[in-house]
Amino acid sequence: MKLKKGDTVIVIAGKDKGKTGEITQVSPKTNKVKVAGVNTAKRHTAARGQTANTGGIIDKDMPVDASNVMLVHKGKPTRVGFKIKADGTKVRVAKSTGDEI
C-alpha cells in the first residue's frame, strides 16, 4: 500500500469529495484507510458505569477505499510511486515532482 498513517490526503471521489485530512488508520488487507473528519457516522452509545462513559451520540470516522484518496504533497494532490536508491533502500516518490516523500 502506498499510503501510510500520518499522511495528509484529499478525497477525490464520494460524498466527501474535496475534503482533506490525516490518515489515522490503514488496512492493507481490505485496501481501506480512515481519514480524520471524513466519512463520519453517528454512533449511539449507552452509558456504562457512573464515571467512565457518559453515553450519547458520537461521530465516528468510517473507512474509505484507498483508491478514493490521493496524497497531498506540497499543497497539491499527487500519485505515489516507489524508487530504489543506490544503497538498496526503497523510498516513496511523488509522481508529479519526483521528490522523495
Image (cartoon, rainbow, N blue to C red):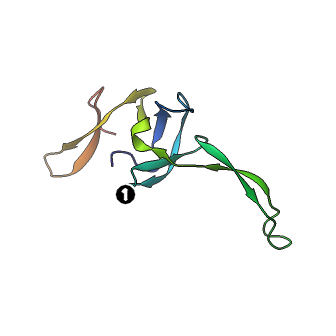
Identity of the residue furthest to the right in this view: 50
Residue sitting at x 80%, y 61%: 55
Residue sitting at x 61%, y 41%: 37
Residue 46 on image: x %, y %: 79, 64
Identity of the residue furthest to the left in this view: 86
Q: Secondary structure at mark 1?
A: loop
Residue 38 on image: x %, y %: 58, 40
Q: Is residue 89 left or right of residue 64?
A: left
Q: Examine the image and state in which quarter residue 78 appears.
A: top left
Where 35 sits versus 16, above or below?
Answer: below
Q: Examine the image and state in which quarter residue 53 appears.
A: bottom right
Q: Which residue is mark 1?
A: 29
Where 52 sits versus 11, above or below?
Answer: below
Query: What kind of residue is marked 1?
Result: Lys
Q: Nearer the viewer, residue 67 or 52?
A: 67
**Other-residue count near label 1 (Cα within 10 Å), few / some / many at <14 / 14–19 / ≥20:** few
